[in-house]
Amino acid sequence: MAPFRYTLRVRFNECDPQRVAFNANYLTYIDIAITDLYRQHFDGSYAEVMESSGVDVVVAEAKLKFLAPARFDDQIEVALTVERLGNTGMEISALICRDGDVLVTGELRYVFVEIGSWEKTPIPDQIRATMAQFGST
C-alpha cells in the first residue's frame, strides 16, 4: 500500500539563523501531514472526526533521525506509513524528503483516548479502516 504524501515549503520563521529548519519543526511537519490525511480521507476535519467518534489521539512516543537539513524555501514531502494498528494505538513511520533525498526519518506511537476521561479506548472502526489504507502490509 502507498504511504500518504503531503508537500509543504519550509518558511523563514521555521529556520534558525543559518536558514536550516529548526529540529522541533519536523514533528510539526509530521503533525500537519497527519491532520491533512484526516481532512482528505474522512468526512470532516480532524476535530470533527475525533469529536464525532468520542475520541482523541495523543502522541505517546516520538523518535526522529536527522540525515540532512531542510533549508528556507525548500519544498519538502512528508510520507506517512501506518506500520501497526493495535487495539488502542497505532505506530506511524515518516519520511521527510527533498527531491527524493531523505532528510529525516521518524517513528511515532499514538494512543487513542476517550474525550474527557483520557482513558485508553479502542480505535474506532471508521478510523481503523481509513488508516489501514496507508499500512505497510
Image (tube, rainbow, N blue to C red):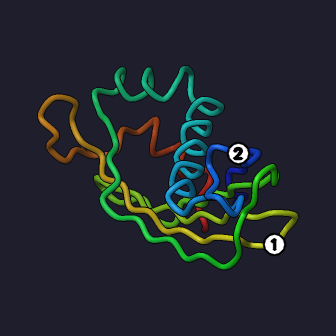
Image coords of residue 103 (percent x, y) = 70, 71
Q: Nearer the viewer, residue 134 or 58?
A: 58
Task: Pinpoint residue 113: horizontal percent, then vertical percent.
Answer: 24, 42
For label 2, the residue is 12
Rendered residue at 58%/42% (across/down): 32
In the rendered structure, which amino acid carries the disc numbered 1?
Answer: Asp
Most extreme residue toward the right is 99
Q: Residue at x 85, y 68 (%)?
A: 100
User: Which residue is disc 1 drawn over?
Assistant: 101
Residue at 54% x, 59% y is: 82
In the rendered view, does 35 fall on the left or right side of 99? left
Quadrant of image for the N terminus? bottom right
Q: Quadrant of residue 123?
A: top left
Answer few, some or many: residues within 10 Å of disc 1's Cα (few below 14, many 20 plus, some between 14 and 19): few
Dividing the image into 4 quarters, which one contains the C terminus? bottom right
Is 37 situated above or below 101? above
